Image: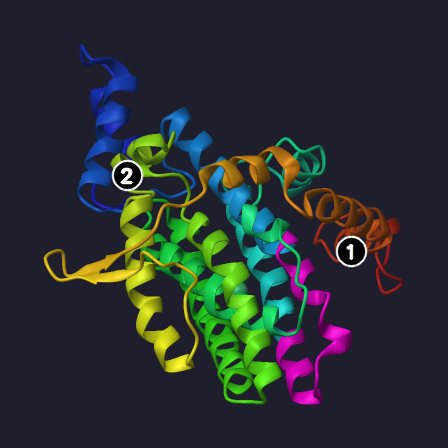
């Protein structure tokens, strides 16, 4: 918030009839209405804070769980170039998780707490990462479709009303755009390769297309959080609007790739100036969310194991930070410290 901070408004309204809470709420509403950013020290409604923590946690969890299906192919990448690109991409996803956990910390929710909830199955990650990566072409399909859907979802989040989230998204979107292009380029190479490679690319697109459309979440009339998130300007467009946008972007790209999208109902609608597309199997979506997707158990088990195996790294990092924190007990500081 810039023009009028919540604390200023609270002071001026302290003795007023409406009371400080109403004044704070009014300042918050005015800031959101004026497209100003809400910053960590600003007053915000508890429900706004809780909604942001829920969304940012789910987003952060998706970034780090999303490392698994692609990391699966690092050792089997078909060339050194492809291996280097894939490693860089998977590392980027770890970085995205880091930015987002850090952004969530500005709301008073620690990373440890969020990870505990993820590991206990009490917070979600994107349903897309519960599908397996069966062939090398899946790496391309994920880059093109999954990172592509993520960009469509996330570019508007760069204008999210909460400052730290919006700023984290700016950098994330730049990197996602690289991810999308590497996937597209990988699929293009396969599509123009041998008949078997072309077939592999088509098969991957057939399997990833529908789950990618599900990434935008349930239809607007069934989306529990959408309307409030849009009122708070956390979200700028509805699930259905973003999904439509994604379909319209992908159709010409699929043509350029020489691949088809697995939807017999997909066609240009002259009147709407957009593509019509077939019905999404929301039962499958709900089943995956409930934990019954092909890889739910594998993903969480691997995540818990990685967390346990990383305990020594966290301890070492904490010890290092203690030693290098100005004013820390000299006895625990590095040998350079003097008593
Ligand atoms: Fe990412
Ligand atoms: Fe990505």
Residue 317 - label: 1
Q: Count neighbours of disc 1 (C-alpha within 10 A) and say few if under 14, some if 14 to 19, many if 20 or more.
A: few
Residue 199 against residue 120 in the figure, above or below: below
Q: Residue at x 69, y 59 (%)?
A: 68
Q: Is residue 143 left or right of 136 when viewed as pictured?
A: left
- For the view shown, which residue lies furthest in the top direction? 17
Q: Secondary structure at mark 1?
A: helix
Is residue 33 shown in magenta? no
Q: Residue at x 33, y 60 (%)?
A: 247
Pointer 2 residue: 230
Magenta: main secondary structure = helix
Stretch of the chain drawn in magenta: 65-87
Q: Is residue 203 visible?
A: yes
Viewer-side residue, 84 vs 12: 84
Q: Residue at x 53, y 51 (%)?
A: 100
Q: Position of residue 119 (x, y in %)?
A: 71, 38
């Amino acid at each position: 918030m810039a023009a009028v901070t919540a604390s200023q408004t609270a002071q001026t309204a302290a003795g007023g009839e409406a009371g400080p809470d109403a004044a704070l709420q009014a300042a918050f509403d005015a800031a959101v209405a004026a497209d100003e950013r809400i910053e960590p020290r600003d007053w915000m409604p508890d429900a706004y804070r809780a909604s942001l923590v829920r969304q940012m946690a789910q987003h952060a969890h998706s970034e780090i769980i999303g490392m698994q299906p692609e990391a699966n192919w690092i050792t089997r990448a078909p060339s050194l170039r492809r291996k280097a690109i894939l490693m860089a991409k998977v590392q980027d996803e770890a970085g995205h998780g880091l930015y987002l956990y850090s952004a969530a910390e500005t709301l008073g929710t620690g990373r440890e707490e969020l990870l505990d909830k993820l590991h206990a199955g009490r917070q979600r990650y994107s349903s897309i990462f519960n599908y397996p990566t069966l062939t090398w072409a899946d790496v391309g399909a994920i880059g093109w479709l999954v990172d592509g859907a993520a960009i469509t979802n996330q570019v508007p989040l760069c204008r999210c009303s909460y400052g730290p989230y919006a700023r984290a998204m700016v950098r994330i979107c730049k990197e996602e755009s690289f991810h999308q292009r590497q996937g597209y380029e990988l699929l293009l190479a396969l599509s123009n390769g041998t008949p078997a490679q072309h077939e592999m690319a088509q098969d991957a697109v057939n399997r990833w297309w529908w789950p990618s459309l599900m990434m935008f979440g349930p239809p607007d009339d069934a989306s529990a959080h959408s309307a409030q998130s849009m009122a708070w300007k956390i979200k700028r467009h509805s699930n259905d609007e973003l999904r439509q946008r994604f379909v319209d972007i992908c159709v010409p790209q699929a043509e350029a790739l020489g691949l088809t999208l697995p939807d017999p109902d997909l066609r240009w609608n002259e009147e709407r100036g957009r593509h019509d597309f077939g019905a999404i199997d929301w039962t499958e979506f709900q089943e995956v969310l409930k934990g019954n997707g092909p890889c739910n158990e594998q993903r969480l088990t691997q995540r818990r194991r990685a967390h346990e195996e990383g305990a020594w790294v966290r301890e070492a990092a904490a010890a290092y930070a203690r030693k290098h924190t100005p004013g820390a007990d000299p006895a625990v500081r590095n040998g350079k410290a003097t008593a």
